[in-house]
C-alpha cells in the first residue's frame, strides 16, 4: 500500500508502523503540525490490532482521518462496520489472492482516491457550497419553478460509491420524519459488506433499513440497499413496487450499479422519481439520471465540497441534469419535503 501511494506525487507517506502500538507511539511523538492528515490502519496486525488501536489513535490525533483496511470476507466486513461506528471515516477491502491481490489497478485507484479525498476534506472542513457558476445547469435550482405539476415521488433512489458509507450514514440520520415513498440505495460494495452496512444504517436513525431481497414489496418509509454482487431492479407488479435481483454483467465496472436500478425505476414509476447521486468515483448513474430527467423526475447531486470524490455527482452536475447541487444536510431536507407534502424537490 505504501508503494502504491508513493506513486502519486500529491501523496507523501511520512511514517510506517508494524502494528497499532508502533503507530500510536509514532503519532504521539509527532508535533501537531507534523501529524498526517490520513492514517491507513490495517485491522489485522500482531500485538495491537487495528480495532484496539483505533480509539487510541483518534484520541491522540482527533483531527486525523482514519481509513481502515480489512479482509474481503464476512469477518472482515463485520470488523469494518464496527470500525466505522467507532470513528473510522472509510474503509478499503483488501482483495483476495484469487482476485489478483493488491496488484490490480482498480484497487490502487480507489485507495489513492480515498486518501486524497479525505486529506482534502481534513485540510478544508466542509461548509455548504454555492453552485459553481461554470456548471451548465439545465433546469432551475429549485424544482418548484420547473414545468409540470408538483407530484410526490413514487420512489426515492440514491447512488453512491467512494466515501458513500459515511455520506449515507449522515443522510439517514437526518431522515427523521416519515417518508411517503420507499428509499432504494445502490452503494458500490462487495458481497457481505452490504448486509452489515444495512444493519449499520438501521441503527443510526428512525428509518428502517435492510438489504433488498428477491420479491420484496417496497414499502414507503423504508430503505432498501442493493446486495453486493447483485443488480437491484424494480418492477411494478399490480401497482406495487417489487425488488428483483439480477446477475447481469457489471455496468461501469460495478455490480450492483446505479444505472440499471435507475432504468428499471423509470419504467416502473413513469418519471415519478427523486434521485440523489452522492460521492463516488467514475460516472455510474449518469446515463440513468439522463433517463430520469427526460421522464420528468428530479435529480440532486452532492456538492464537491462535501464529496470525498466528486466523480459520480460531478458527472451529473456537469451534464446539466441536476436540479440542485447540495450538501448532505440539504439533500436530506429536500427528500423530506418532497416525500412529506407532495412538493417537488
Image (cartoon, helix red, strand yellow):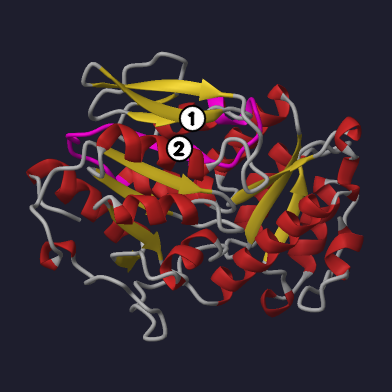
State which tag comes first along the sequence, 1 or 2.
1
182 part of magenta stretch: yes
**Whole-number angstrom distance, CA of label 1 to CA of label 2:** 6 Å
**Of helix, strand and loop, which one carries label 2?**
helix
In the rendered image, the quadrant that contains the N terminus is bottom right
* The one of 31 and 283 positioned closer to us in this rendering: 283
Q: Residue 2 falls in which quadrant of the image?
A: bottom right
In this view, the residue farthest toward the top is 215
Relative to residue 101, is residue 160 drawn left or right? left
Relative to residue 156, is residue 285 drawn left or right? right
Where is residue 101 drawn, in percent x and y?
Answer: 89, 40
Q: Is residue 240 above or below residue 188?
A: above
Q: Residue 323 falls in which quadrant of the image?
A: bottom left
Residue in view at x 46 percent, y 15 percent: 214
* Region in magenta: 174-195
Where is residue 5 drawn, in percent x and y?
Answer: 83, 65
Where is residue 264 drawn, in percent x and y?
Answer: 40, 35
In the rendered image, the quadrant that contains the C terminus is bottom left
In the picture of the structure, the residue carrying the numbered disc 2 is 261
Dot label at residue 189: none
Relative to residue 326, is residue 77 drawn left or right? right
Where is residue 333 drawn, in percent x and y?
Answer: 22, 54
Q: Residue 209 falls in which quadrant of the image?
A: top left
Dot label at residue 232: 1
Amino acid at each position: 500500500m505504501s508503494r502504491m501511494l508513493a506513486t502519486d506525487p500529491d501523496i507523501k507517506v511520512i511514517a510506517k508502523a508494524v502494528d497499532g502500538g508502533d503507530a500510536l507511539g509514532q503519532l504521539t511523538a509527532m508535533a501537531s503540525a507534523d501529524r498526517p492528515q490520513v492514517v491507513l490502519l490495517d485491522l489485522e496486525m500482531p500485538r495491537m490490532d487495528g480495532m484496539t488501536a483505533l480509539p487510541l489513535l483518534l484520541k491522540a490525533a482527533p483531527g486525523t482521518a482514519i481509513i481502515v483496511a480489512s479482509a474481503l470476507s464476512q469477518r472482515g466486513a463485520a470488523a469494518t462496520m464496527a470500525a466505522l461506528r467507532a470513528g473510522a471515516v472509510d474503509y478499503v477491502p483488501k482483495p483476495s489472492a484469487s482476485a489478483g491481490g493488491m496488484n490490480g489497478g482498480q484497487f490502487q485507484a480507489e485507495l489513492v482516491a480515498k486518501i486524497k479525498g479525505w486529506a482534502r476534506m481534513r485540510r478544508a472542513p466542509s461548509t455548504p457550497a454555492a453552485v459553481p457558476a461554470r456548471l451548465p445547469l439545465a433546469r432551475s435550482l429549485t424544482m418548484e419553478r420547473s414545468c409540470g405539476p408538483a407530484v410526490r415521488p413514487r420512489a426515492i433512489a440514491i447512488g453512491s460509491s467512494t466515501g458513500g458509507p459515511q455520506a449515507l450514514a449522515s443522510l439517514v440520520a437526518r431522515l427523521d420524519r416519515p417518508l411517503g415513498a420507499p428509499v432504494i440505495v445502490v452503494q458500490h460494495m462487495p458481497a457481505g459488506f452490504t448486509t452489515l452496512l444495512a444493519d449499520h444504517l438501521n441503527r443510526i436513525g428512525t428509518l428502517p433499513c435492510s438489504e433488498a431481497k428477491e420479491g420484496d414489496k417496497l414499502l414507503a418509509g423504508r430503505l432498501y440497499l442493493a446486495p453486493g454482487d447483485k443488480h437491484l431492479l424494480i418492477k411494478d407488479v399490480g401497482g406495487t413496487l417489487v425488488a428483483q435481483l439480477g446477475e447481469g454483467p457489471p455496468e461501469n465496472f460495478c455490480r450492483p450499479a446505479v444505472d440499471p436500478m435507475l432504468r428499471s425505476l423509470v419504467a416502473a414509476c413513469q418519471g415519478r422519481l427523486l434521485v440523489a447521486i452522492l460521492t463516488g468515483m467514475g460516472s455510474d448513474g449518469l446515463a440513468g439520471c439522463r433517463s430520469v430527467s427526460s421522464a420528468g423526475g428530479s435529480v440532486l447531486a452532492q456538492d464537491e465540497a462535501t464529496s470525498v470524490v466528486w466523480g459520480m455527482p460531478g458527472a451529473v452536475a456537469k451534464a446539466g441534469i441536476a436540479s440542485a447541487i447540495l450538501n448532505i444536510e440539504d439533500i436530506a431536507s429536500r427528500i423530506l419535503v418532497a416525500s412529506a407534502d407532495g412538493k417537488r424537490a
